Amino acid sequence: MRFMHIADVHLGVVPDKGKPWSKSRSKEIYSSFQRLLDTAKEEKIDLLLIAGDLFHFPPTMDMLRELDAQFMELDHVTTVLIAGNHDYRAKGSPLDRYEFQSDTVCLGTGEAKQLVLEDLHTCVTGISYDRKEIVEGIYDDLTPSLPGKEFYADYFQILLAHGGDSRHSPLDRNRLLRSGFDYIALGHIHKPEMIKMDQMINVGSLEPIDYTDTGERGYVIGEAERTDTGWQLHTEWRAFSSRQYVDLNIEIEPDMTNYQLQKQIQERMEAMGTEHIYRIILRGYRNAAFQADLSSLMNRYRIYEVLDKTQEAYDLEQLEEDNADNLLGQYIRTLKGQEDALHRQALEYGVKALLRCRETE
Ligand SMILES: [Mn+2]
């Protein structure tokens, strides 16, 4: 049994609102999902698991019809999804009423729902969100044998769950690991995490959605095999996203020019990949008169924002001369000329603190 596990695709999201690439990025989320389905075809999977937030908001009938048409193209693939906090399944909503023509099941809300796939000898258990926030841990008590339901003892048991923070079904990881499920497919937290190898994986979002989603994003592919001693599972997380958000830290030097700064940033971006969306974080010391101007780079690359965390470099000689008769001047005289790291740091911190005191006086 071969399966793929994805989550948090957020179809319909308009990332980085107001930025020049925002609209095309919104379309790219859709094309990335189609690319994923193409990959599913190539990989000849049997089961596609979607652990919530396939959509960025509760889908309309039209959105579901489009989705259904895409799933129709997948031959011999069963898709099982749960609704998450973004695309929650409210009673009577389009998602609640929609009847899929493709081999697709959206597990219901409230109590645990179970889908038995006889031909795959597999059982999928899960619960959809029916609202934006669920503060109780709705998955913590689940086991493959649900009260009042038949227990498919030798089936491959999958749990589909969405959440993991205080307002979205907090997860008791240790309890889940002891629950008896063979594979626990998690969604909601966008950063991927292999919680327990081949057993519990938070897959992360398929694509990064905003600048806090730095790093690669992707999907899990798994193969479960029945042996004499039970099921053998092998899983692999694969990077897939079209681009990444990157925090680029740039160290400024006091005598740096704008030309040098731009050139350095440009070289770094070219080396890492011009498809990425960057946040430039300027650090280090600059001259009092220096003003970073990155407007030409902003026009040519995807730069979300520039954060200036630089500090003004002090001209110690000048400071000492101007403050010859006060505490600051005395402090500089006491510590200067001592070249070890500790003294230099003390000098730097002390001068900064004394200057700041003066500002607030
Ligand atoms: Mn979510």
Image: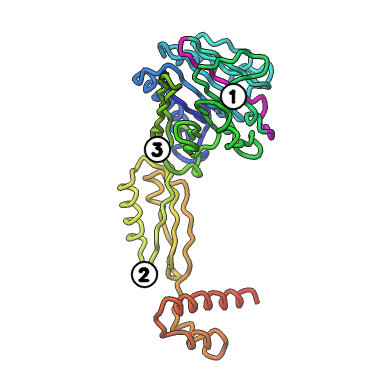
Reading the image, the residue beneath label 2 is 255
The residue carrying pointer 1 sits among few (fewer than 14), some (14 to 19) or many (20 or more) residues within 10 Å by Cα, namely many
Reading the image, the residue beneath label 3 is 243
Q: Is residue 114 above or below residue 213?
A: above
**Image quadrant in which you'd find residue 300:** top left
* Residue 127 falls within the magenta-colored stretch: yes
Say whether mark 1 is within 8 Å of ligand 1: no
Amino acid under disc 2: Asp
Amino acid under disc 1: Ala
Tell me where residue 178 appears, x and y as whole percent: 57, 32
- Residue range corresponding to the magenta coloring: 119-136
CA gap between label 3 and label 1 equals: 26 Å
Amino acid under disc 3: Arg
Between 132 and 81, the one lying in front of the other is 81
Residue under the point 39% across and 69% down? 254
Between 330 and 224, the one lying in front of the other is 224
Residue under the point 38% across and 67% down? 253
Reading the image, the residue beneath label 1 is 83
Confirm whether residue 10 shows in the render: no
Residue under the point 61% across and 39% down? 165
Circles 3 and 2: CB distance less than 8 Å?
no
Circles 1 and 2: CB distance less than 8 Å?
no
Q: Quadrant of the N terminus?
A: top left
Residue found farthest to the front: 229
Between 110 and 18, the one lying in front of the other is 110
Asked which secondary structure carries label 3, the reply is: loop
In front of the other: label 1 or label 2?
1
